[in-house]
Amino acid sequence: MAEFKNAEEMLKNYTTHGCFVVAGERPNVMTASWGFFGEMWGKKVAVVPVRDSRFTKGIIDEKQEFTLCVPFGDKYKKELLYCGTKSGRDCDKVKDLSLKITPAKKVNTYVIDGCGAYYECKVLQVMDFSGQEISPFVKKAYGEKPDYHNFYFAEIVEEY
């Protein structure tokens, strides 16, 4: 069974405040606040949903890797909100927020300094949710103009 360091604290913060998803050599940062951590195919895995419309999606599709940086407590609350409402197509969020970044250890992108948990991820599989038969419950959750997620199943190659 896959074990995660500080799992309870990480999951509490991930689901309450969200985390930073960082991708690319010129790092783009977005906010994610739901997904899954566990074991699949004999590997420690994170499943991260990213909407079709997100700038980050194109970077992850090209690079096939990213990091998840989970702040603990209220640290980075306003930064998470900003990164969840602004597009990297239109701004440099790292610069705008004066985020301090450090190169990741095993993937070719960065981590946001000062977070409580870090996961370096390599994409194993992508599931395009928009092509699936969608239940009425999920359709209602997406509303009138759906912007469906793609689910990135990614091996966690480094955790700290």
Image (cartoon, helix red, strand yellow):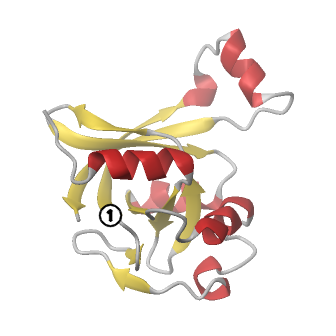
Q: Is residue 129 above or below residue 137?
A: below
Residue 55 placement (x, y as % from top left): 64, 61
Question: Residue at coordinates 52% horizontally, 70% vertically from top-left?
Answer: 75
Residue 16 placement (x, y as % from top left): 54, 48
Whether residue 124 appears in this view of the structure is: no
The residue most toward the right is: 144
Whether residue 98 appears in this view of the structure is: yes
Callout 1: few (<14), some (14-19), or many (20+) C-alpha neighbours within 10 Å?
Answer: many
Residue 21 placement (x, y as % from top left): 49, 61
Image side of residue 35 versus residue 130, left or right: left
Q: In this view, does 99 lie above or below 14?
A: below
Numbered disc 1: secondary structure: strand
Residue highlighted by disc 1: 118
Image side of residue 1 versus residue 132, left or right: left
Q: Quarter-wise, where is residue 102 in the image?
A: bottom left
Q: Quarter-wise, where is residue 152 in the image?
A: top left
Q: Quarter-wise, where is residue 96 in the image?
A: bottom right
Amino acid at the residue labelled 1: Tyr
Q: In this view, does 58 lie above or below 150?
A: below
Q: In this view, does 119 lie above or below 99?
A: above
Report the quarter where the C terminus lies: bottom left
The image shows a total of numbered marks equal to 1
Image side of residue 76 versus residue 107, left or right: right
The residue most toward the front is: 73
Question: Residue at coordinates 46% horizontally, 39% vertically from top-left?
Answer: 35
Image side of residue 72 versus residue 117, left or right: right
Report the quarter where the N terminus lies: top left
Residue 103 placement (x, y as % from top left): 33, 81
Question: Residue at coordinates 26% horizontally, 53% vertically from top-left?
Answer: 6
